[in-house]
Each structure stands twice: as structure tokens, then as C-alpha cells.
């Protein structure tokens, strides 16, 4: 890693500072403990203990359509990146469309904040793609109880004038890490659409194609690892050689690799290379039979619905920590003639 690149922790610190400039934080004043309060405290120590306070209930997750979904667009300004000649360029414009769960309102009332906090999924689109291409998948995740933030990268997106520079992928792991920090900071604020919505201990990343390469590096490459990430989903992704580094060494988070068996752009061996880089960690490989490069992820057909169900079960188990989701993951990923889910380095049967 070049000295010019910031670590993920530094990027999150910068993101928190930037979020403070956008959303005002309320300051709380704490007074000292007076005699009456001290007496109450002493009495409390000698009084018979009452029932223990119950922890806040966890939000219900896992079922597509459980929640209504709202969305908000954020204009994030990331730190400088690295240009083709190695010099710093920036700042980087990183718009994000955030979909989040809400409690459905009545016929005359607007939807209300759902009781969170919810896990966060930050999504990286593929080359020349934007969030709209993945609307069905991202909406499904949000409706199942996830805050889903889809980024628009400055040099590889569908936006006119983006520059179409695939080599800029070298900066995208840092972009995602910065966005995570910014979103966590916004959730810590007392006001705003994301206030209190994100669980900072349940952060996942997902991406397709070049976006899959991006999150594979963020989750599992020594060059770019962000340890706040607890789970990753790589859709038709591969190693990105210019980044260097070793992929998926010890300590990498649980990862699901999804691959179409007939993908002509990202052939199965590319996903398999990542999947088998470390067979000691939690690694799953979903083989979507006969699928290509776009259809399993973009649109609302049968293969897209299968991918949505399997990825939600994976997120339930490894981002939200619901052990009971393991059975759903296995069941949803194994559909005769449609898909095969394997793990631990095992190969899907032909």
C-alpha cells in the first residue's frame, strides 16, 4: 500500500468528521450527583433487586417484503485517490442511494422509522453500472431488514462523464471503506433519515463484477482489508492483479461467492480461485446453473429471485448473526437443476 493511501481506520475517521459537517449533533450536558441522588444510589445498593431490564428486541430479519422500503440519496465526498501516474487526485465524488426498512404507515400517514438498528450492506456496482441496474436485488435486501447503500463510483459508473477508466478500481476499496465510515457516523447522529438505523457491529459488503473485485479486496486482500466488515458477498468477482496482495488469508470474514456457470465475462474459474484461496474460513460458492454475467443479479426473473433468497439467508446468518439461518441458506441454495451451494473448498457437482 502506498503511503499516499489512507488505512481503512483513517478513512472512517475522515468520514465521521465529514458527516459532522453535514448533520448537527446535539450536545448533552451532564451534571454532578447531588446529596439526594447519592442517597437514592445508596438505597438502591441495599434495596432488594428488581427484575433485570430486558434488552431491546432484535429487529425481525430475513423475509422479503417484511418491511416497507424508503430511500435517500447522499452526496459523499471521499478523500483523494491515486491517479494513473501515481499522483493524488480528488476529492472523489461518491453519491450513494440508501434504501432502508420502514414500518408501513396507515392510509393517511407516512411510513415511520422501523425499530432498528439494522445490519448495513454497502454495495459496489459493476463496470459502467449504477444502482438502478440492481434495483430488484437491493430492494429485496432492504425489505428483509437491511440498510442497503449502493455507491456510484466516479470513474467506472454509468454516469455520463465518468471517464470509463477501469484502472480506477484500485481506488474503489478505499471508496467503500470511506462510505462505511460515513454511514456509521450518520447513524450515530440524533437526527436525519439514518439516525439510529445502523448496527455498527453488523456491516457487510457486496458487489458485482468489478464491484465484486472491489469488495473481495476490501474483505480479503491484505492490501485493503477493513476489519469492520463481518461478511461479504462477491457476485461474479475475481482477483484484481494491480492491487497485489494475498486474498482471503486467516481472519477474513465469511464470504459467499455467486457465479453463473455460463458467464462469458467472468468465467467460473475466476470466482473459484477466490473461493478456494482459503478453505479454512467460512466460504460458500453458489453455482447458478446456465446463468450469465448480468441476468442472475439485474432484473426480477427466477434466477434473480433465487440469488436474492440465498444472499438474504447468508446475510441473516453471518451479518446479523442468526444461527438458525444456516438451514435456510443450505435449503435455498440447493435447487435441483437450478443452483448448487457448496462450502469448505468443495466443488459443485457437474
Image: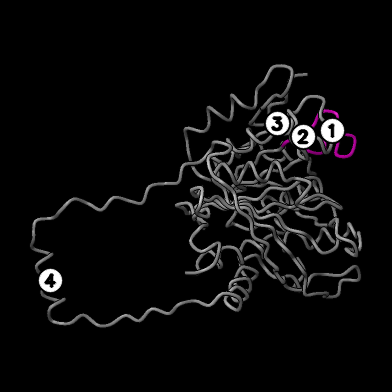
168 is higher (above) or lower (below) than 333: below
Q: Which residues are magenta?
A: 258-272
- In terms of secondary structure, where does tag 4 sit? helix
Percent from the top left, x then y, of residue 182? 61, 67
- 144 relative to 4 in the view: left or right: left
Where residue 7 appears, x then y in whole percent? Answer: 67, 67
> How busy is the neighbourhood of tag 1: few (under 14 within 10 Å), some, or many (20 plus)?
some
Q: Image point 77% across, 34% down: which residue?
A: 296
Give the alpha-carbon distance from disc 2 to disc 4, as whole Å: 62 Å
Q: Is residue 224 left or right of residue 166?
A: left
Decide which of 334, 344 is in the foreground and name it.
Answer: 334
Q: Name the residue rendered at 68%, 30% in the picture.
A: 306
Q: Which residue is mark 3?
A: 286
Quarter of the image for the C terminus: give it: top right
Tag 1 residue = 292
User: Which label is found at residue 40?
Assistant: 4
Residue appearing at x 80%, y 47% in the figure:
239
Mark 2 vs 4, N-terminal side? 4
Element carrying mark 1: loop
Residue identified by numbered label 2: 296
Q: Secondary structure at mark 3?
A: strand
Q: In terms of sequence position, does the residue under pointer 2 or pointer 3 come before the other?
A: 3
Q: Residues within 10 Å of mark 4 (few under 14, many from 20)?
A: few
Residue 104 in percent (x, y) is at 51, 47
Q: CA distance from mark 1 to mark 4?
A: 68 Å
> Residue 22, located in which quarter of the rendered image?
bottom right
Amino acid at each position: 500500500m502506498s503511503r499516499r493511501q489512507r488505512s481503512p481506520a483513517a478513512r472512517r475517521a475522515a468520514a465521521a468528521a465529514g458527516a459532522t459537517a453535514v448533520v448537527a449533533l446535539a450536545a448533552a450536558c451532564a451534571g454532578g450527583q447531588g446529596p439526594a441522588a447519592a442517597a437514592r444510589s445508596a438505597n438502591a445498593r441495599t434495596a432488594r433487586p428488581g427484575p433485570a431490564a430486558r434488552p431491546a428486541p432484535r429487529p425481525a430479519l430475513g423475509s422479503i417484503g417484511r418491511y416497507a422500503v424508503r430511500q435517500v440519496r447522499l452526496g459523499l465526498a471521499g478523500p483523494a485517490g491515486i491517479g494513473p501516474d501515481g499522483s493524488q487526485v480528488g476529492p472523489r465524488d461518491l453519491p450513494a442511494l440508501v434504501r432502508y426498512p420502514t414500518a408501513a404507515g396507515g392510509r393517511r400517514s407516512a411510513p415511520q422509522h422501523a425499530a432498528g438498528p439494522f445490519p448495513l450492506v454497502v454495495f459496489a456496482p459493476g463496470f459502467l453500472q449504477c444502482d438502478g441496474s440492481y434495483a430488484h436485488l437491493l430492494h429485496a435486501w432492504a425489505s428483509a431488514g437491511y440498510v442497503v447503500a449502493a455507491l456510484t463510483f466516479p470513474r467506472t459508473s454509468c454516469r455520463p462523464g465518468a471517464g470509463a477508466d477501469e484502472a480506477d478500481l484500485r481506488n474503489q476499496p478505499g471508496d467503500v471503506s470511506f462510505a462505511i465510515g460515513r454511514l456509521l457516523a450518520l447513524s450515530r447522529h440524533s437526527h436525519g433519515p439514518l439516525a439510529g438505523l445502523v448496527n455498527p457491529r453488523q456491516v457487510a459488503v457486496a458487489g458485482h463484477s468489478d464491484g465484486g473485485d472491489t469488495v473481495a479486496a476490501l474483505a480479503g486482500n491484505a492490501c485493503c482489508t477493513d476489519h469492520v466488515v463481518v461478511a461479504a458477498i462477491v457476485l461474479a468477482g475475481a482477483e484484481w492483479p494491480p492491487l497485489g496482495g494475498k486474498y482471503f488469508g486467516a481472519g477474513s470474514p465469511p464470504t459467499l461467492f455467486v457465479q453463473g456457470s455460463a458467464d462469458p465475462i467472468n468465467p467460473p474459474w475466476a470466482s473459484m480461485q477466490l473461493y478456494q484461496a482459503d478453505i479454512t474460513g467460512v466460504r460458500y460458492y453458489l453455482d447458478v446453473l446456465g446463468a450469465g454475467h448480468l441476468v442472475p443479479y439485474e432484473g426480477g426473473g427466477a434466477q434473480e429471485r433465487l440469488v436474492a433468497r440465498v444472499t438474504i439467508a447468508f446475510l441473516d446468518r453471518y451479518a446479523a448473526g442468526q444461527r438458525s439461518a444456516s438451514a435456510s441458506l443450505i435449503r435455498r441454495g440447493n435447487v435441483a437443476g437450478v443452483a448448487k451451494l457448496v462450502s469448505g473448498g468443495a466443488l459443485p457437482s457437474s
